[in-house]
């Protein structure tokens, strides 16, 4: 007797898992207060001018976004190890250039805390001049991806990987800025910064100057947490600007001996990359940094766009055009030797909630940044570094999905593992390698979850002369092959087996080969076994 394999079970492609388009859980929800007009707050009353009907609303919103963006631009630059003016330059380009281009009408671009760690590592390894070359090439890569219509593909990235990426960035950002909070120098990498925290605590406790700086930074964080609860004041002055302004006033009034932001001047900060800077791009490390800049900035911008679209009822984001707009902005930032840009959810949500109706608000916010950088550059020199570190520590905590991880672990444990593994990998290695590890884990998890296969076995209670019927159902991949073969090997060895594979939706090469081998081996074993139909082999 021989086992039989029913023909017709050919491999087929497994359908892609459908995921809802969503950004990280830290992004704001789409709820708005009752009575809020479409696209903004109740204060967004159209102007009487027929040519510019929303000029008044956009003008007001642009001032709010400017006040939110100013401390963040400076803080991100200082944390990245570059002159503070370069953060303002990136914000200006994000407003005046990216703000004018099609894509998303209401989201605002500028330097983001999410790229701070990567920028710091790039400047440390390659130098400030090469940073401009890296940003320039990354911007061109973004433009190419948008032209090839790859923008929508970024929406297919696992949400757990994005949340893990943001959590990893938040951990590294917090660990690094805790040193700046006490006017101390961070050891370097994320893991080294975390390992040096016990020494930082003991060193700060024994230093009056460090304790003074820490008090200023801690006070800044306290204002950031408490200021939004004062509703009336929060509507007039955004929390980041209020916190930095109060810290600056306290340091000035008390003449505290702590570090201030170093000012070099707007024009002197612009240093376009030269030929030697582009020559360094041939190294493997530089290529990896370029890819990391392009992919992470694109993913963060497009996830931000999805979140901003949920905040208003205006035109939806055109993802490919938005990707090209971000690329154009980064190309110009690279030419100017400035920081890379992304769309930033904090500024974008402030823009929408302030009543912005068109892209004019984000363009005007770039104008205000330009006027401030050109007319009041000395104002940056009075800002305490500890205050900016407090702003970024607070921003880092907001990147951690502290509220969502518990429910995620209970409901989707595999997703929680991917999130945690991505965050830990970023802390232990670096941004690029950590995200790659997270993506590989997400793919492996999905493959494991979709490769379900089970056997329907019938005929075991039938007479020994009747074959056992085995029908395979599901997706047979190499991941489930050991269990599948164990089940088949457990069948009676003196019975004929009919193996039916027509119920499989997918059969990969490894499974097909293994099942064919099993069928051939089982056929030979059954044929040579002593049975009533095969008396020649009876003992």
Image (tube, rainbow, N blue to C red):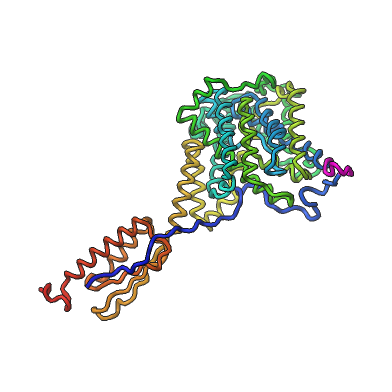
Nearer to us in this view, 247 or 531: 531
Write the residue at 62% across / 21% down.
Answer: 271
> What secondary structure is the stretch in magenta mostly built from?
loop
Looking at this view, name the residue that lies furthest to the bottom: 463
Q: Quadrant of residue 478?
A: bottom left
Left or right of residue 264, residue 443 in this image: left
Residue 288's place in the image compared with 127, above or below, is below
Q: How many marks?
A: 0
Write the residue at 53% across / 33% down.
Answer: 290
Q: Is residue 215 visible?
A: no
Left or right of residue 115, residue 538 in this image: left
Left or right of residue 505, residue 289 in this image: right
Q: Is residue 101 visible?
A: yes
Q: Is residue 53 magenta?
A: yes
Q: Is residue 36 magenta?
A: no
Residue 89 at what x, y percent from top left? 68, 28
Residue 147's place in the image compared with 408, above or below, is above
On-image quarter of the N terminus: bottom left
Residue 365's place in the image compared with 498, above or below, is above
Residue 346 at what x, y percent from top left? 68, 41
Residue 97 at what x, y percent from top left? 70, 33
On-image quarter of the C terminus: bottom left
Magenta region: which residues?
47-55
Write the residue at 59% across / 55% down.
Answer: 20
Left or right of residue 517, residue 193 in this image: right
């Amino acid at each position: 007797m021989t086992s039989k394999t029913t023909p017709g079970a050919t491999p087929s492609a497994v359908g892609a898992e459908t995921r809802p388009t969503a950004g990280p859980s830290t992004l704001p929800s789409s709820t708005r207060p009752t009575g809020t007009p479409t696209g903004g707050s109740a204060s967004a009353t159209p102007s009487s001018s027929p040519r510019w009907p929303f000029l008044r609303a956009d003008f007001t919103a642009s001032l709010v976004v400017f006040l939110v963006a100013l401390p963040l631009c400076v803080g991100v630059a200082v944390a990245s190890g570059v002159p503070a003016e370069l953060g303002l330059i990136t914000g200006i380009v994000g407003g005046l250039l990216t703000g004018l281009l099609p894509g998303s009408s209401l989201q605002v671009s500028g330097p983001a805390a999410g790229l701070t760690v990567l920028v710091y590592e790039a400047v440390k390894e390659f130098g400030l001049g090469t940073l401009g070359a890296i940003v320039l090439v990354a911007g061109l890569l973004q433009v190419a991806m948008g032209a090839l219509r790859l923008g929508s593909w970024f929406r297919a990235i696992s949400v757990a990987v994005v949340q893990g990426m943001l959590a990893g960035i938040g951990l590294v950002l917090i660990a690094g800025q805790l040193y700046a909070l006490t006017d101390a120098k961070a050891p370097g990498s994320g893991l080294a910064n975390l390992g040096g925290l016990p020494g930082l605590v003991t060193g700060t406790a024994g230093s009056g100057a460090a304790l003074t700086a820490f008090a200023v930074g801690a006070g800044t964080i306290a204002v950031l947490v408490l200021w939004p609860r004062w509703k009336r004041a929060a509507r007039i002055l955004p929390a980041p600007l209020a916190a930095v302004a109060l810290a600056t006033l306290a340091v000035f009034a008390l003449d505290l001996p702590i570090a201030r932001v170093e000012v070099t001047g707007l024009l002197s900060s612009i240093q376009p990359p030269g030929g030697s800077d582009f020559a360094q791009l041939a190294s493997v490390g530089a290529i990896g940094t370029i890819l990391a800049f392009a992919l992470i900035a694109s993913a963060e911008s497009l996830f931000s766009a999805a979140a901003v679209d949920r905040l208003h009822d205006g035109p939806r984001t055109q993802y490919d055009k938005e990707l090209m707009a971000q690329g154009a902005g980064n190309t110009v930032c690279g030419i100017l030797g400035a920081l890379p840009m992304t769309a930033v959810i904090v500024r974008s949500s402030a823009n929408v909630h302030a009543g912005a109706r068109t892209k004019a608000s984000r363009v005007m916010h770039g104008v205000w940044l330009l006027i401030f950088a050109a007319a009041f550059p000395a104002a940056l020199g009075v800002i305490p570094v500890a205050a900016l570190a407090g702003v970024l520590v607070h921003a880092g905590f907001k990147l951690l999905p502290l509220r969502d991880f518990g429910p995620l672990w209970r409901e989707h444990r595999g997703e929680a593992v991917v999130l945690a593994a991505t965050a830990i990998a970023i802390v232990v290695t670096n941004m690029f390698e950590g995200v790659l590890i997270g993506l590989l884990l997400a793919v492996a998890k999905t493959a494991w979850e979709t490769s379900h296969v089970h056997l329907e076995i019938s005929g075991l209670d039938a007479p020994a002369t009747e074959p056992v019927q085995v029908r395979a159902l599901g997706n047979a991949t190499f991941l489930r092959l050991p269990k599948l073969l164990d089940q088949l090997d457990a069948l009676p060895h003196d019975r004929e087996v009919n193996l039916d594979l027509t119920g499989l939706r997918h059969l990969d090469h490894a499974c097909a080969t293994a099942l064919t081998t099993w069928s051939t081996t089982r056929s030979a074993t059954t044929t040579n076994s002593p049975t009533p139909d095969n008396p020649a082999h009876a003992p």
